[in-house]
Image (spheres, rainbow, N blue to C red):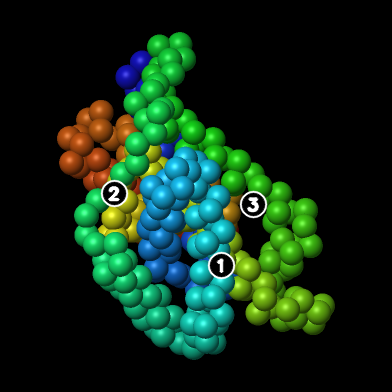
Amino acid sequence: MELLQAVVNGLLIGGVYAVVSIGLTLVFGVMSIVNFAQAEFLMLGMFVAFFCWQHLGLDPMLGALVAFVVVFAFGALVQRVLIERVLRAPEVAQIFLTVGLLIVLENAALLAFGSEFRSVRVPYQTSAIEFGGLIVGVPYLLAFAISLVAGALLWAFMRYTWLGQAMRATAQDPMAALSLGMDARRIRQLAFGLGVGMTALGGAVILPYFTASPTVGGQFAVLMFTAVVLGGLGNVLGAVLGGLMVGVIQTVSTLVLPIQLQNLALFLVFILMLAFRPEGLLRQK
């Protein structure tokens, strides 16, 4: 029962990891650029939802929608002004730009919000539901449910809408998409906005059980990259699978390791995956 409880907890946490990782892999899939600043957009989403709760009394689960819209717009602007300019530049320039963006966003947040940790208080914060001997925290369950819905909506958008199909076409063959009359620049801008918006939404829904701070992105950056490497960078379904795996590995490892070392097993899996199957579980070599 203890193992089953750990697996269930891991799946609930991993569902949120999956959503924030989808954003990272979506950006790479369409633009072929690794956004090292992706976790900072998660931090921005947390602060947007926090201030919606503080000043408007909006529940973080609803504030997550506001966070998605705000960060989507900001991300589209960043892509247009900065990212688009280095897409044809050497990869080292892309790395320096996104790492520089990470530093700028984190330090701008420190200047604007201070270094203190912020948390919300909601009625269901300490509530739990029992299922056949398993105890599930309501905040975790809500965060998982909203993440699941967001992921399903993104999948439907990518599969059934013209814009979604255009994004997939641009990811597969940018030149062919351009020859068919698609505005590749607009498609890339949309993809980047959606990618960072999804990550911001994932950050917002965990506010009832996680504190927001300008440096919180550093706690999620490695988790996000581990998830997309496990599933296959650029593969949306792989990001979902990788996120769930990361959550389960984290929680199950605490059964045999001290909680301070809960990421040790995760990093070992990450290293082994890079060594023996760097393309990920769902990508072909």
Q: Is residue 90 left or right of residue 119?
A: right
Q: Mark 3: which amino acid? A: Leu
Q: CA distance from mark 1 to mark 3?
A: 17 Å
Query: For the point 43% across and 15% down, which residue is it?
Result: 130
Query: For the point 33% across and 75% down, which residue is it?
Result: 104
Q: Mark 1: which amino acid? A: Ala
Rendered view: 252 above or below 42: above
Q: CA distance from mark 2 to mark 1?
A: 24 Å
Q: Mark 2: which amino acid? A: Arg
Q: Is residue 15 left or right of residue 69?
A: left
| Quadrant in the rendering for residue 140 | top left
Closer-to-camera residue (228/103): 103
Q: Is residue 64 left or right of residue 124?
A: right
Per the image, the residue denoted by label 3 is 154
Residue 261 point in image, percent of width and height: 20, 42
Query: For the point 52% across and 83% down, which residue is it?
Result: 81
Q: CA distance from mark 2 to mark 3?
A: 29 Å
